[in-house]
Image (cartoon, rainbow, N blue to C red):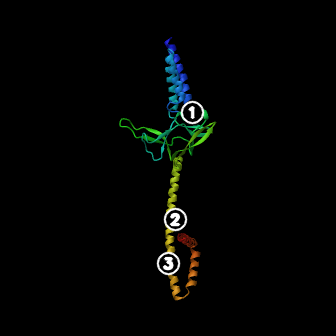
Amino acid sequence: MDTILIIGICILIVTVSSFLGKTIQKITDFIIPLEFITISITVAPLIASIFINDLLLWVLPWIFGYFLGYCLTSNKKWLTIGPVNLKEITPGVFPKWIVPYIYEGKWCIQKQCNKALFFKIFFKIHHYVDTNVPLAPNGRLHYAGHPWMPRVGDEIMYLDKYMELPPKIIKIGRFKVKKHSTYIRVPNTLLASPLERMLREESYARASKAVTEISADNIFLKNEVQNEIMNTALNLVKNSTVEKKPLSVYMKDIKDLREKHPDIFYEDLNKKSDSDEGEDNNEQ
C-alpha cells in the first residue's frame, strides 16, 4: 500500500477516534480514561489485532486519537476544593478535587469509579450537591513547591463546609440502590464583591464607633442614677429619723424615681423578680 495513502488513512482514523474520545469523556466525566467504556473501546481492537494480521497498524492510531481527544476534553474539568484557612497546597492532605457537572439544572459530582458511572448511565442516578453557590473557583492557591521546581498556583474553591450526606436507599425494580449526595457551603464573606466588602467594613466601623459611644453614655448615666439613689437613701434615713414619717417619705421618693427613670427602675425590678424566682426554684 502506498505510504501517502497509509498516512492519510491514519490521520483519518486519529481524527475520528479523537472525536469519539471527546464524546465519551463528556458522557462519563472521568479525568483518567479508566472507565469501562474506554477499556472496551481500546482493549477490544488490541485483542483483535492478535488474531488479524496487519490490524495493529490501524489500531495504534485509533487508540492514540481516542486518548488524545479524551484527555484534551478532560483538561481542567475538575475543581480543586479546600477549607478557607488553607494557604498552601500540601500533597496528600489538602486540597481535594471533584468533577462537577450540571444535570437538569442541578449541580452534581461525578465520582471517579465505574460503579457510580454505571448507575449514572443506565439508571440516571446522579450524585447531587446541596450548595449555596455555583461550583466554580473563588480564589487561587500556591503549591508548597519543590527544591528544583518553581512555585506554581492553581485555582481553588474555598469552602466552609464539605460533607457527604448519608445515602438514601431507592428501589429500582427488584434491586435497592444507594443514592449519594454532598453538602457544600461557601462562607458569606467570599460571596461579596470587593466593593461590598469595603462598604461592609465601613458600616461595621461606624456601628462599632456608635456602640462605643452609647456604652460610654450608658455607664455615665448608670453612675448618675446610682449616686442619686444613694442620696435618696440618705434622705430617707434622715427624714425617717427627724420627721418620723418613713413610709410616706419613702413612697413619695419612689414615685419620683419612677417618673424620672422608668426604664432603669423597672429593669432593676425585673432582674430582682427573676432572681427571686430562681431562688424559689432552687429551694424547690
Residue located farthest toward the top when viewing the structure as drawn: 1
Observer-nearest of 5 and 43:
43
Q: Which residue is mark 1?
A: 118
Tag 1 secondary structure = helix
Give the percent coordinates (x, y) of residue 234: 50, 81
Mark 3 crowdedness (10 Å alpha carbons): few <14, some 14-19, many ≥20: few
Q: Which mark is residue 30?
A: none
Say what amino acid the circle numbered 2 marks. Answer: Ile
The answer to which of marks 3 and 2 sits earlier in the sequence is 2
Image-quadrant location for residue 110: top right
Observer-nearest of 147 and 227:
147
Compute the Cα span from label 1 to label 3.
Answer: 82 Å
Answer yes or no: is residue 55 visible: no
| Number of marks in picture | 3
Say what amino acid the circle numbered 1 marks. Answer: Phe
Q: Which residue is mark 2?
A: 214
Q: Quadrant of the C terminus?
A: bottom right
